[in-house]
Amino acid sequence: MTTETNKNFARPTYRQDDQSEIYLYQPTAPNPDAICIAMVYPAAYQIALSSLGYMILFQQLDMSPDIDARRIYADTLNDHNPKELEFMGFSFAFELDIIKILENFAVYHIPMFAKDREREHPLIFAGGPVPMSNPEPFADFFDFFLIGEGEEMLPRLIDVYRENRHLTDREELIQRLAANVPGLYAPGMYDVQYEGPDGPLASITPKYDDIPVLVEKQLVSNMDDFVASTPIISDKAIFSSTLLVEIMRGCAHRCRFCLASYSMIGPVGSGLPGARGGAIEKVIARIENGIQYTNKVNLIGALISEHPEFSTLCDYLDNKQDLTVSSSSLRVDTLTPQIVNTFKRGGQKQLALAIETGSERMRRRIHKNLKHEQILQAAEMMAKAGMESVKFFGMIGLPDETEHDIELLAELMREIHKNNPKLKIHLGSSSFIPKAGTPFQWQAKISNKQVDQGFKILRQSLQDVADLQASSAKWDYFQAFLSRGDRRLSKLIIRFYELGGGLGSVNKAHQELKAEGLADFPELDWYALRERPEHEILPWEMISLGTPKHILYKEGLPPAGFER
Ligand code: SF4
């Protein structure tokens, strides 16, 4: 990884990168027999540059002489000779990314289905939140997925590949990787049977004895070795000329819907690490290095203010003149006047707080243990510090929610407005989407009609005290059926892609397949909206995020004394 003593590194002369890029590490020219790996980001260059997870893995490869590391973005397709590429590794954060990924296959003449690829084609893999939760709807398109954090998995993958690079049989090569790289899930190595074309899974069986029945997610345990920070600064990035620094990874609060929590930590006693942050001196060293080139710093993490030494970091930041300090969102009950003031001094006019719901009853239901008073105090702290506005994130359609609970969210906004009339309030809201790998993976999602009705209630009850930014019901539905889908959906995905990949074409794709007699999979509502019985075999059951199924199920039940 990057050392903290870097000084304005020489640009690599062996490649044609964007001239505005400032490297904070020393890239290494590849050896003649280096393994050629393209790291692909399925969105534009400016977004990729601000994706810390993608960039640090590229950096890691780029510092090794044994790797010829390339970058590909959705707007730089076609820049490489596909014959040179041995791997293409996709960052896969959102279900809709699949459209850009398939576009990429087409440009590089890679067969869409993994089973149709030859040894000469690059090995196609993906990592990120989508495969970690449920890779199954996309199983037919990838040779393998990396389940977990890549920093330690990638080197292991490369070592095992190097030992087997000579193999001429693609299936045998993938089998060796699947058998020897912990966290590597190769879907083609498993037989999946269904209880009829409209039914759930009947079984998932590895095809070979050396293929794991359960693929365990991999987490780095010592964050001191992997404090992540922007390796390449550019004014073209979405976070223009900004140093992103990771403060915390994972979150131990285990809100029952939260994939960011369940995928990034292990439960107590599992042997997997919990929420992690690097030592504060390592974090500060990263900032010191980065601010030689920029005065903008963004603190990254699901729960940055829970870093045990966060106040030391605030003291450090407070003493830096002219530094702009920002962060995506903070947790209400960890907020202190010092933290708010650090961001205020750092130039922030608004802070974001995820409260999920305005009803204390619902917050208990989802294990978001915030008190009404704590939310009021957080808003007051911001108003006192002179913040212009606050952004809250909320959800509708949570399990056991009533219309009254939705009204309580609006009532809370009204109360905050009354107490702090000068503080502008923004409310971002989406509908609850049950995510695989969380305790709410069995829960039903509300229909599009109910989503629209819920937002109507919210809008009316808000009475103009807050500006509501509501998600699209169609978009939420799209994510919902893929989030809990199985590999039978690959046909639909391909047709959807062929129709241009706009959200409006999902139904058209489905209707066309039905008319052609090819829709041999259940209705989309069956995937998206249905509550699943406890013992149904779930399509993603070959992936273990660390918490056993029976414990997840128990955690998803209403807490003791909860009134429905
Ligand atoms: S506090 Fe936020 S990040 Fe943590 S589990 Fe809850 S929703 Fe997820």
Image (cartoon, helix red, strand yellow):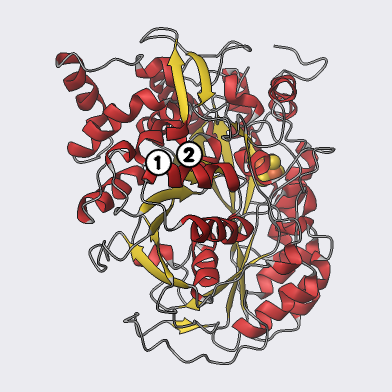
Observer-nearest of 474 and 249: 249
- The picture places residue 322, in percent across and down from the top left corner, at 62, 85
Mark 1 residue element = helix
**Do we see residue 563 in this rendering?**
yes
**Label 2: which secondary element:** loop
Question: Looking at this view, is 196 or 552 the one in front?
Answer: 196
Residue at coordinates 68% horizontally, 83% vertically from top-left?
A: 4
- Residue 482, x across and y down, in percent: 42, 30
Residue 171 circle label = 1
The picture quadrant where one finds residue 405 is top right
Q: Nearer the viewer, residue 204 or 453?
A: 204
- Classify residue 341 as left or right of residue 454: right
Can you say whether 48 is above or below 206 in the image?
below
Q: Which quadrant of the rendered structure holds the N terminus?
A: bottom right
* Quarter of the render that holds ligand 1: top right
Q: Count the marks: how many? A: 2
Q: Residues within 10 Å of mark 2 (few under 14, many from 20)?
A: many
Q: Residue at x 38, y 67 (%)?
A: 71
Task: For label 1, count other residues whose C-alpha is less than 10 Å away and answer few (under 14), some (14-19) or many (20+).
Answer: some
Q: Amino acid at mark 1?
A: Glu
Proximity of marks 1 and 2: CB atoms separated by less than 8 Å: no
Residue found at x 39% / y 7% = 196
* Above or below: residue 113 compared with residue 286: above
| Mark before the other along the chain sequence, 1 or 2 | 1
Which of 127 and 366 lies nearest the eye of the viewer? 127
Which residue is identified by label 2? 186
Q: Is mark 1 within 8 Å of ligand 1?
A: no
Name the spot of residue 156 as percent of width and height, x first.
59, 57
Residue type, label 2: Ala
Q: Is residue 496 left or right of residue 183?
A: left
Q: CA distance from mark 1 to mark 2?
A: 10 Å
